[in-house]
Image (cartoon, helix red, strand yellow):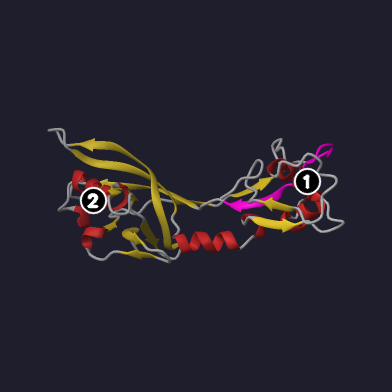
Amino acid sequence: MAKLTLYRCSMQIDKIVPKGGTANTFEATINPESYKHDYALQYTGTNGDRDTPVGKSAPIPKYSMADPEKVSFTLIVDGTGVVPDSADQTVAQQIEKLRKIAYDYDGEAHEPTAVKIVWGDGLKEFFGRLTSMNVEYTLFHPEGAALRAKIQLSFIQAVTAAQEALEAKRSSPDLTHVVRVQTGDTLPMLCHRIYKDAGKYLAIARHNDLDNFRDLEPNTLLRFPPMRGKGAQNV
C-alpha cells in the first residue's frame, strides 16, 4: 500500500524542487484514516461591503480571488515495535525528523521549509507549508518515554514568485491601471470596463481624491488599483 510521504523542498523563482535523500523524506508508517483538502473563493459586495452601491435591495457578489488551498490530516507514530517499519525508531526520533522536514525554520530562505505531500492518486503532488502541528502522546513506557503519538498536521498551499505573478495577470482587477479620461467617460462606466462592477465608483473616487466624480475632466489621469476585499488597495 502506498504510504503518505513528505519531501522537504527548496523554493526557486519558477518552481518548487523536492530535495533528495532519506534525511529530507518522511514516510508515514501508519497512513491517516482520512485527509481534508479545502478550497475557498472570495467575493466582494457581501457582508456590508462599502463597495456595494447604495440603494441596492440585495448585494451582487463579485469574484475577487481564490484563497490558497489547504490540506490537513492526522498521523499516528508508533514506537512499541509492533509496526515493522518503525521498529528501529523511537516516537521522539520520528517526531524530530518530521519537525526538521516540515516545521523548522530555513535560515537561508528566511521562512519555514516548503514540502511536497504525496499519497496515492488523491494527493499526487501538493506543495505546501506547515501552518500547525499538534502532538498528542497517547501511550507511554513505564519509565515515561512516549510509545505512541497522534500528530495533527495542517498545510497551506505554497507557490513560487513566478506562480504568484502568473496568478496576478489572469484577472485585470488584480493589476493597477492608469486611465486617461476621454470625453463622455463616467466613473461608473470606467469601473465596469475594468472591474466588471460599476458599483466600485465611490472607492475609485476616494482613491483619486475626486471632489466631483460626476463631471470628469477629459485628459485627467485616474488610477484604478487592484480591488481586494473592502475598498481599493495597491499590491
Check if residue 105 falls in the magenta segment: no
The quarter holding residue 203 reads top right
**Residue at x 63% of width, y 43% of height:** 229
Magenta-drawn segment = 53-66
First reached walking from the N terminus: tag 2 or tag 1 = 2
Position in image of residue 182 (x %, y %):
81, 59
Q: Is residue 1 visible?
A: no
The amino acid pointed to by label 2 is: Lys
Residue 65 among those drawn in magenta: yes
* Residue 200 seen from this side: yes
Name the residue tied to disc 1: 199
Amino acid type assigned to the residue bearing label 1 in the image: Gly
Estimate the x, y position of residue 146 in percent, counting from the top left: 20, 38
Residue 97: mark in rendering: 2
In this view of the protein, which residue sits in the foreground, 5 or 58? 58
Q: Residues within 10 Å of mark 2 (few under 14, many from 20)?
A: some
What residue is at 68 percent from the left and 43 percent from the top?
A: 207
Judge depth for marks 2 and 1 and give the one in front. Answer: 1
User: Residue 111, image x and y in percent?
Assistant: 35, 49
Local packing at callout 1 (Cα closer than 10 Å; few below 14, some 14-19, many 20+) is: many
Element class at badge 1: helix
Identify the secondary structure beneath mark 2. helix
